[in-house]
Image (cartoon, rainbow, N blue to C red):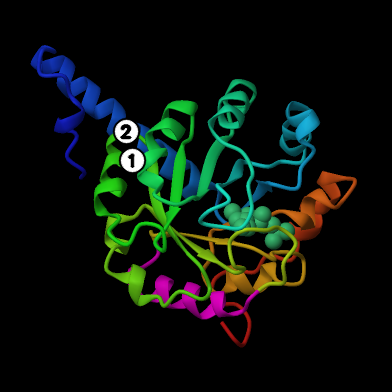
């Protein structure tokens, strides 16, 4: 149980402090319960969507049965691409009750993490490559009521991440090098998913991101993935309902298939 004392104003009556701490703690638990309840779940990655009609896009995704959104925040430094920041999260927060999962592909994520919490994120992952000593930020995010996790690129050795996994609510295993949608799936993610699932048990939420489509989705779920981030395999389709159905019908349970 994360210590919420640092979040509590010492002038508040003791019972109000207890109430405040339990609200914060239950917000994280509530998000995790939603994710645990919907897994394996497809999370559309808002990178290739129509930003000129964002509310309509979200409504179409909700009609297609989407249960959470993945927002790709890029700063042009940590990755050679630049996307969006807190204003997009704030705008989305106003128009949807879906869980908002923010993927920070930014240098020094501690500078902006709290701003994304305030903007309405329910879950935040940041890269181990940008925060080699992530414990403090992971604890701060949870104390602020947000589920917190680490992301790792395919080219980064797992050893960089493993000792911090017990402090994470989820781990984001990249199956492409962070920075762009539409890349080819890197199968190195499969053994990583399988290792994390076998090492840390059934409750750790495993998210996979990059090159997930109707050809690759079965392999990532059969190797243990819970949250499947999908960009081009949804947003390059005219009909999001059809795209989601095509993806869902390929999902296999953990352990299914010869190579899992
Ligand atoms: C890449 C992003 C991914 C990407 C997924 O840096 O984190 O979320 O947008 O897009 P596809 O599914 O097209 O690989
Ligand atoms: Zn992403």
Direction from residue 191 to residue 197 in the image, left or right = left
Q: Can residue 33 be seen in this snapshot? A: no
Residue 54 magenta-drawn?
Answer: no
Secondary structure state at the residue bearing disc 2: loop
| Viewer-nearest residue: 111 or 199 | 111
Foreground pick, 189 / 223: 189
Residue 81: horizontal and vertical position, in percent? 64, 53
Label 2 close to label 1 by CB (< 8 Å): yes
Is 200 inside the magenta-drawn segment? yes
Where residue 108 appears, as percent x and y from the top left, is 39, 49
**Residue depicted at 34% across the width and 76% down the height:** 159
Which residues lie in the magenta part? 186-202
Q: Quadrant of ligand 2?
A: bottom right
Q: Residue at x 40, y 64 (%)?
A: 202
Image location of residue 83, percent across then percent down: 64, 44
Find disc 1 in the rendering and name its residue: 141
Name the quadrant of the N terminus. top left
Residue linked to disc 2: 144
Magenta stretch, main secondary structure class: helix
Which residue does the image show at 16% across and 23% down from the upper left? 18
């Amino acid at each position: 149980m994360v210590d919420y004392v640092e979040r509590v104003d010492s002038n508040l009556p003791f019972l109000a402090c207890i109430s405040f701490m339990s609200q914060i703690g239950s917000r994280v638990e509530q998000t995790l319960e939603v994710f645990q309840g919907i897994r394996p779940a497809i999370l559309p990655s808002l990178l290739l969507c129509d930003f000129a009609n964002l509310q309509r896009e979200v409504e179409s995704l909700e009609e297609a049965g989407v249960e959470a959104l993945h927002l790709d925040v890029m700063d042009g430094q940590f990755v050679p691409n630049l996307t969006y920041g807190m204003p997009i999260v704030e705008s989305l927060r106003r128009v949807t009750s879906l869980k908002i999962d923010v993927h920070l592909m930014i240098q020094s994520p501690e500078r902006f993490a709290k701003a994304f919490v305030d903007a309405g994120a329910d879950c935040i992952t940041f890269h181990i490559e940008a925060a080699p000593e992530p414990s403090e930020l992971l604890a701060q995010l949870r104390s602020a009521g947000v589920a917190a996790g680490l992301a790792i690129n395919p080219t980064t050795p797992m050893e960089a991440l493993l000792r911090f996994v017990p402090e994470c609510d989820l781990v984001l295993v990249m199956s492409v090098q962070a920075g762009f949608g539409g890349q080819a799936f890197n199968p190195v993610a499969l053994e990583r998913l399988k290792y994390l699932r076998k090492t840390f048990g059934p409750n750790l939420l495993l998210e996979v991101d990059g090159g997930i489509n109707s050809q690759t989705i079965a392999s990532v779920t059969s190797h243990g993935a819970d949250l499947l981030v999908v960009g081009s395999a949804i947003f390059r389709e005219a009909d999001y309902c059809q795209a989601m159905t095509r993806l869902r019908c390929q999902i296999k349970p953990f352990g299914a298939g010869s190579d899992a």
